[in-house]
Image (spheres, rainbow, N blue to C red):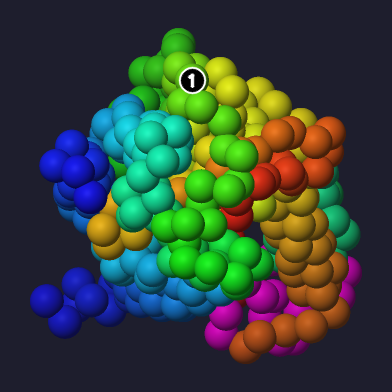
Amino acid sequence: MRRFLRDNSLGLVFGLLFLIVLAGQAFAGHADYNQRLLTEGLEPVSLGRYVTSASFGVDVAENWQSEFLQFFLFIFLTVWLVQKGSPESKSLDKVGRETAEEQKIGEYADEDSPRWARTGGLRTTLFSNSLGLVMGAIFVLSWLAQSIAGVAAYNEEQLADRQDPVSWAQYLREPDFWNRTLQNWQSELLAVASMTILAIYLRQRGSSQSKPVGSPHTATGVES
Amino acid sequence: MSIRSAAMLVASALLVLTGCGSVDERADAAASVATGLLTAVQAQDGADACAAMAPDTIAELEESAGKPCAEAVLDEDLPAPGAVTGSDVYGQWAQVRLTEDTVFLAAFPGGWRVVAAGCTPRAQRPYNCLLQGG
């Protein structure tokens, strides 16, 4: 058990932190939502009612979609784009999808390679792109969820302001939708750009995300 | 308050409180309260009309008119209750569109209550309402 926890500590700790912070967001969002209701002369709602509301849904989904977009872009773009000196980049001479031998697929698969890496055909093509595709799919679904929850939350505000609600298609053209979307995208893109560039010159001893402390600034695609 | 109005408000309260009514059921409940208010005004039943109104709306009306809600609401020239042409519910708010009026409602522990009635649209601006709270 102890060994299992140690061997999976990265995923477990981030998963646990996610749940704790999501719960924190629910409590803070609930308090904020009820403050607004009180100023509008309405009664506060229960926590259960809030976490099933469009308001909570859009706040969660707008952040999720941008995170998965970030991963999707990073995974796909790092196939062709490189950054000299960055541990986030692969070697400068490996631009592109690389050869079957380098990727250990088909006849070059190892004994312990996943079966779908060995079989060839559609399965290997799918498996070869599965990480990016799943990230991309979660991004699209989260963005869709943002738009659906977003139009409901937006319309709640519209009605509170004595204005007409809008349809989903109209909402996609509203500044509220794009403001929520783009404010998240810009922060994710800044984070990726910062990590890619700062990791050229800065080190974090022992971190998988950093080059070894003594590695030269010019060393590319080197991680601890 | 008439038995019909009381039943309507109780049904509306149950749907709002339990939160288990479907959107259609909640929209229907909001439409019932909206038409109930206009019907009561048409019938010169101020008490019944005020029972369908939100606390802030009652307070605003009494303050601006300088008399009790049951009297003041009858002076507001609210339109007759036409047919319901549409009803939307989003969270704690609802809009009911009638042939002669647009009514805004909010969810309270006692059910839907009218926060604004006698509303006419204005381009790119909030509705202008004869009756509305704060």
The residue lying at 23 percent from left, 76 percent from top is A5
Q: Where residue B56 sits: x, y (%)?
A: 51, 67
Tell me the quadrant of the picture where the C terminus of chain A can be found: bottom right
Q: Specify start and end residues of the magenta stretch as a single range.
A: A206-222
Q: Is residue A130 left or right of residue A79?
A: left
Q: Is residue A220 magenta-colored?
A: yes
Q: Where residue A61 sits: x, y (%)?
A: 52, 50
Q: Is residue B36 left or right of residue B104?
A: left
Q: Where residue B98 sits: x, y (%)?
A: 52, 24
Instruction: Say which quarter of the image contains residue A19.
Output: bottom left
Q: Does residue A48 sit above or below B21 in this rendering?
A: below
Give the residue number, with chain letter if any, for mark 1: B82
Tell me the quadrant of the picture where the N terminus of chain A can be found: bottom left
Question: Amino acid type of disc 1?
Answer: Gly
At mark 1, the secondary structure is loop
Instruction: Please say whether residue B92 is visible from this viewpoint.
Output: no
